[in-house]
Image (spheres, rainbow, N blue to C red):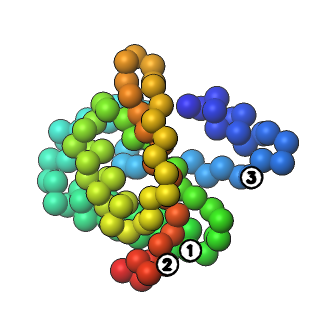
Amino acid sequence: MTLFYYYLDRKPGAKRVDILAYPAQLAKQPGGYNESVAVADEQAFLESTREFARQQAKILAGRPGHCLWLIDTVWNPLTTRIVTSAFDQVLRRTESIPVQGGSGGFSKYLIYEAHLAKVAM
């Protein structure tokens, strides 16, 4: 994935790519995410994910034409269910692109844009 972003960002005429990690501990320790620990309090995780989605919706609302790409994998099914549910409630999903990943993992790129009626939520 790093190479994809590296080349995407350097393609002639390319737009700037902001890379975010959610949950935040993924940025601090890639590969060290423990779903059972992160989602031990499922309700708290859901609320923090909704808040993160609302923040992203406000950012996108101020950037017409910009999209947020969420990379969904099979390795953390509970996290995936909570995150996609929260993002689907706050943002407008415009596309889902299935991708066959390495190590037998199946992923999807979920593409979202601001849904202006929901941004104020």
> Going 41% across and 77% down the picture, which residue do you hit?
118
Q: Position of residue 4 (x, y in %)?
A: 63, 32
Quadrant position of the C terminus in the picture: bottom left
Q: Check contact, mark 2 vs mark 1: CB within 8 A.
A: yes
Rate crowding at label 1 as few (under 14), some (14 to 19) or many (20 or more) other CA atoms within 10 Å: some
Dot 2 corresponds to which residue? Answer: 116
Q: Do the residues labelled 1 and 3 touch (CB within 8 Å)?
A: no
Instruction: Please name the residue shown 16% across and 54% down the image.
Output: 42
**Looking at the image, is mark 2 or mark 1 earlier in the sequence?**
1
In this view, 90 is above or below 49: below
Specify the amino acid type for callout 1. Ala
User: Is there any visible trace of residue 38 in the rendered image?
Assistant: no
Q: Taking the image as drawn, is residue 66 in sight?
A: yes
Q: Nearer the viewer, residue 104 or 4?
A: 104
Disc 3 versus disc 2: distance between alpha carbons? Answer: 23 Å
Looking at the image, which residue is at 44% across and 81% down? 117
Q: Position of residue 11 (x, y in %)?
A: 79, 39
Q: What residue type is labelled 3?
A: Lys
Q: Which mark is residue 15?
A: 3
Alpha carbon distance from label 2 to label 1: 7 Å
Percent position of residue 76, x then y: 28, 36
Vertical placement of 81 versus 88: above or below? above
Q: Mark 1 points at which residue?
A: 61
Q: Indicate which disc residue 26 carries.
A: none
Residue at 25% across, 65% down = 47
Question: 10 Å neighbourhood of mark 3: few (<14), some, or many (≥20)?
Answer: few
Marks 3 and 2, the one that precedes in the sequence: 3
Q: What residue type is labelled 2?
A: Leu
Q: Mark 2: which secondary structure?
A: helix
Position of residue 36 in the picture relative to residue 105 (left or right)? left
